[in-house]
Image (cartoon, rainbow, N blue to C red):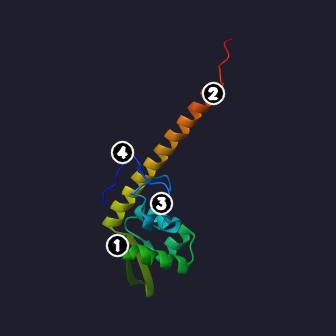
Amino acid sequence: MTAKHDAPTTVPKGSGEGRFAYEGLDRTIHERARLSVLTSLITNPKGLAFNDLKELCALTDGNLSRHLRVLESARLVEIVKGVDRNRSLTLCRITPLGCKRYLLYLETLEQVVRDAAQVANQQSDKALGRGFAPSRA
């Protein structure tokens, strides 16, 4: 996967997409709950127990399970089931591929923010240029 960070890709008018498309905004990661799961896992590289991850992400058992299945099928996380002190334990870990794709996603998101700030600054400069004259005291 190659992420282009020099400039956003312009999307043709009427394509149904936004004005700019950023290839690195991976739809698998971009969903809020999955982004939360990956953020929690990348900051805990040894992994997190299912219940701890559920609490960190404020998700129900069913929602977390569904999002973990999506992330697991994309090979971004691994799920390891085991036993700890005679209790079943489900451990969730981010994979090396998941880490790589997450970091690429963040780079692209940073580019989105830079581009938006640049446009906002240009619009602000234009607004100040129209009919605005600093006082000459």
Q: Which of labels 3 and 4 is toward the front?
A: 3
Question: Label 2: which residue?
Answer: 130
Distance, label 1 to label 2, CA atoms, is 53 Å
Residue 105 locus on image (x, y percent): 40, 57
Residue pointed to by mark 4: 6
- Labels 1 and 2 touching (C-beta < 8 A): no
Give amino acid for label 1. Arg
The residue depicted at 55 percent of the width and 71 percent of the height is 55
Q: Residues within 10 Å of mark 3 (few under 14, many from 20)?
A: few
Q: Residues within 10 Å of mark 2 (few under 14, many from 20)?
A: few
Position above or below: 53 against 123: below
Of the two numbered discs 3 and 2 in the rendering, the one whose residue sits closer to the viewer = 3
Between circles 1 and 4, the one closer to the viewer is 4
Q: Counting residues from the N terminus, which is met first, the one under dot 3 or under dot 2?
A: 3
Looking at numbered disc 4 in the image, what kind of residue is underneath it?
Answer: Asp
Q: Provide the secondary structure element on which disc 3 rests.
A: loop
Q: Which residue is mark 3?
A: 15
Give the foreground label among 1 and 2: 2
Residue 77: % across, % down: 38, 72
Q: Earlier in the sequence, mark 4 or mark 2?
A: 4
Quadrant of residue 90 in the image?
Answer: bottom left
| Residue indicated by mark 1 | 75
Rounded to the nearest whole Å, what is the CA distance between mark 4 and mark 2? 31 Å
Q: Amino acid at mark 3?
A: Ser
Mark 3 vs mark 1, foreground winner is 3
